[in-house]
Image (spheres, rainbow, N blue to C red):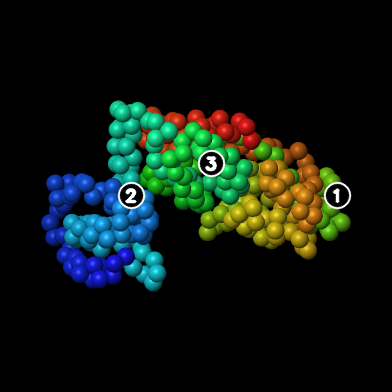
Amino acid sequence: MNKTAERMVSIVPKATKMSLRDIDLNLLVTLEALLRERNVTRAGQVLGASQPAMSAALARLREMFGDQLLLRVGREYRLTPLARDLVGPLQSALAALQGTLERRSGFDPQSSTREFRIATSDYVMAVLMQPFLAHLREVAPGIRLHLRNADSAVQRKLANARIDLSIQPAGVLAHMPGQVLFSDQWLCAVCSENDEVSDPLTMDQWSSLPHACFGFGSSGIVLADLMLGPLAVARTRQVVCESYLTLPFLLPHTRLMALIPNRIARLFANNGQIRLVQPPKDFPNFTEAMSWNPLYDNDPAHLWLREELVEVAKQI
């Protein structure tokens, strides 16, 4: 940000009640980009505006709201309490307006430059989003994706329209509209040098070996535990990792065992450092499903996005 311009802005808190008549509505799209990116340069890149123009717009917004909105802390910017309160309603309102405009004018994927924000695991990014990006190159070259790791706050982000879709195991977001995309099987992975492990794994081995597990959030939510119930509980969790793709790299030269999806396991099957074995029992398959805010139920662009994801998922 232009630090000189930032110092020149004198913020006077609003002493009177604000209304929409006090707000330059032309600046709301700029405000949404600034609050989402928390960076003037990146917000300008999203909107196709120069850094000086974005700095000037931020100065106007600060004066209009009587609030700094973005505060520099070290090398990054953080939202003020007012800015945090504005994020959800602003994104919901703009998304609803965008949907209305597209329903009126029609959605053309070939010419659209819309950005979709999708929260999911690195597993889904590897097995679904990679072929989906190749598909977009052919059918919608201007569409942009912002892929982020799903966390324990994903339901709140969906509810506030901060993300467009979340792709997670079916049932994780039971209170949102959803659709199943694909299923996968569980495999067990161990160090290739671990000769104490049979194939298939025995229940004794399952219970005695230390496990490296995929989980997320400050509470270390382990998705396999949610899906497998008592079978998952009867194990020793030594490592919880927020990345499926990292799990195979943790196994060499250890006694660790990891329960990982088949499609991820096969990516590492030939590296010579891990060995894949069948679980001790017929674990149920798990399904990945996409969820979205009901606000987008009839949004033409969203409908198109979901239909394309379903079609690509059929081919993986």
Query: Does residue 270 lie above or below 66 as drawn?
Result: above
- Reading the image, the residue beneath label 2 is 47
Nearer-the-camera pick, 49 or 265: 49
Nearest to viewer (mark 2 / mark 1): 2
Alpha carbons under labels 2 and 3: distance apart: 22 Å
The amino acid at mark 2 is: Leu
Q: CA distance from mark 2 to mark 1?
A: 56 Å
**Residue 294 spot, x, y in % from top left:** 40, 34
Amino acid on which the number 3 mark rests in the picture? Leu
Label 3 vs 1, first from the N-terminus: 3
- Name the quadrant of the N terminus: bottom left
- How many neighbours does mark 1 have within 10 angstroms: few (below 14), some (14-19), or many (20 or more)? few
Name the element at disc 3. helix
Residue type, numbered disc 1: Ser
For the point 30% across and 27% down, the residue is 104
* Label tally: 3
Image point 51% across, 38% down: which residue? Answer: 137
Marks 2 and 1, the one that precedes in the sequence: 2
Instruction: Residue 133: give its label.
Output: 3
> According to the image, label 1 marks what residue?
198
The answer to whether the residues at label 2 and label 3 have Cβ atoms under 8 Å apart is no
Where, by quadrant of the figure, is residue 16 drawn?
bottom left
Question: In this picture, is 15 found above or below 116?
Answer: below
Tell me the element at label 1: loop
